[in-house]
């Protein structure tokens, strides 16, 4: 493996791949896998389903993105779920990194639209991992029960091509539009994410959201089961 790829096996902010418990978990998930592709095929659905997609969680500290904290919480939004998958992949020996894009969710529930004040999901996150000699994208955001409830297409692991959020749902209605690709980062660029949110949603709105989730108060809870 080249020295450049080895950089994507090391810990980084928010990527807890070196913790013994994370390493042990990754080994148990991929036990017996004959290749990185087979290991990735096991890691992807595990991370997608182990943590429920939920934006009403603490998000303003790098500690909120560590794999063990996300697993203990059992809930997380796209960056937290992607950081978990990235950590597990690195712990299993698969070079991985975080990638970002601004997207529009055409089926954003009204409560979440009220929370954000915008249909744009700024700095949406997914994983890129090095499989079969190339970087492939994989989005673990939405678990199977949520997709079934919303009639969304479930993102499945594909060893040959990117596994991104689909443009249309099961009924053919518009779902996700990728507006702008923002590139990859080795770890969670927390301040970059928060600055992007402040620019898109307003500093006061982001601060109110952060305070509410820290205190566990029911601030606009109608948006919590939304993507």
Image (spheres, rainbow, N blue to C red):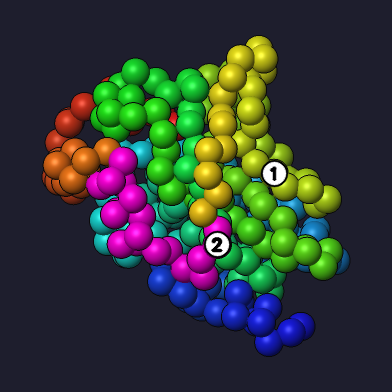
Judged left or right of residue 3, residue 69 is left
Element under label 2?
strand
Q: Residue furthest bottom?
A: 3
Judged left or right of residue 19, residue 219 is left
Q: Nearer the viewer, residue 123 or 7?
A: 123
Res 100 visible: yes
Q: Residue at x 65, y 41 (%)?
A: 164
Q: Which residue is mark 2?
A: 184
Magenta span includes 101: no
Among the two numbered marks 2 and 1 on one chain, the one whose residue lies closer to the N terminus: 1
Q: Residue at x 34, y 29 (%)?
A: 118
Res 143 visible: no
Is 199 drawn above or below residue 178 in the view shown? Answer: below
Tell me residue 50's x, y (percent): 53, 46
Q: Which residue is mark 1?
A: 163
Say which quarter of the image contains residue 155: top right
What is the CA distance from the residue labelled 2 to the residue labelled 1? 16 Å
Tell me residue 15's x, y (percent): 47, 68
Is 172 drawn above or below residue 47 in the view shown? Answer: above
Q: Residue at x 78, y 64 (%)?
A: 134
The stretch in magenta equals 183-200
């Amino acid at each position: 493996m080249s020295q450049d790829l080895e950089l994507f096996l090391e810990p980084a902010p928010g990527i807890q791949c070196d913790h013994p418990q994370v390493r042990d978990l990754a080994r148990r998930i991929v036990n017996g896998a004959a290749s990185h592709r087979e290991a990735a095929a096991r890691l992807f659905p595990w991370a997608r389903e182990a943590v429920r997609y939920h934006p009403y969680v603490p998000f303003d500290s790098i500690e909120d993105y560590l794999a063990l904290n996300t697993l203990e919480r059992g809930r997380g939004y796209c960056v937290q779920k992607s950081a978990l998958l990235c950590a597990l992949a690195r712990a299993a020996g698969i070079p991985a990194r975080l990638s970002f894009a601004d997207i529009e969710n055409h089926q954003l529930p009204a409560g979440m639209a009220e929370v954000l004040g915008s249909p744009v999901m700024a700095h949406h996150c997914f994983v890129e991992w090095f499989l079969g000699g190339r970087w492939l994208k994989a989005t673990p955001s939405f678990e199977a029960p949520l997709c079934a409830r919303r009639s969304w297409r479930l993102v499945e692991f594909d060893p040959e091509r990117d596994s991104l959020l689909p443009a249309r749902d099961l009924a053919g209605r518009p779902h996700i539009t990728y507006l702008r690709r923002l590139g990859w980062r080795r770890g969670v660029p927390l301040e970059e994410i928060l600055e992007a949110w402040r620019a898109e949603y307003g500093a006061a709105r982001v601060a109110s959201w952060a305070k509410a989730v820290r205190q566990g108060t029911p601030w606009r809870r109608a948006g919590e089961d939304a993507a």
